[in-house]
Image: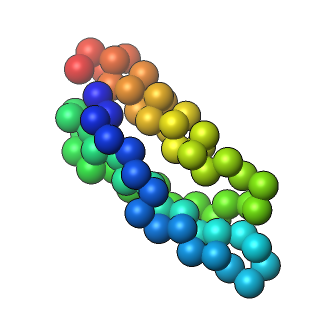
Amino acid sequence: MVTSSTIIQNDLQVDGRRWITELHVDTVQGDLYFTYLAQPTDDVDAIMAARAAAINAQDEAQGD
């Protein structure tokens, strides 16, 4: 189960995109990092929340 999710990197690029690194602390899988290049219009908080929900669903599917 994800106990916390945080954006630990949000670096603006010259073209307006941003390098994002998320940290999800999961009691099953440990610390999980995801890095991606976000478009200027991307809602990175919504992306992070959706990823946390997917991690939780994966943990449940594995019976943990």
Q: Residue 31 placed where, x, y %?
A: 27, 50
Quadrant in the picture for residue 41: bottom right
Q: How is the image coloured?
A: rainbow
**The N terminus - image quarter:** top left
Evaluate whether residue 14 shows in this view: yes
**Direction bottom: furthest residue:** 14
**The C terminus - image quarter:** top left
Q: Residue 59 placed where, x, y %?
A: 33, 25
Against 30, residue 17 (above or below) is below
Which residue is drawn at the image coordinates 58% and 69% (left, top)?
Answer: 19
| Left or right side of 33 for 14 | right
Evaluate whether residue 58 shows in this view: no
Which residue is drawn at the image coordinates 41% and 63% (left, top)?
Answer: 8
Which residue is drawn at the image coordinates 64% and 69% (left, top)?
Answer: 18
Which residue is drawn at the image coordinates 52% and 44% (left, top)?
Answer: 48
Q: For this rendering, which residue is in front, 52 or 64?
A: 52
Quadrant in the picture for residue 46: top right
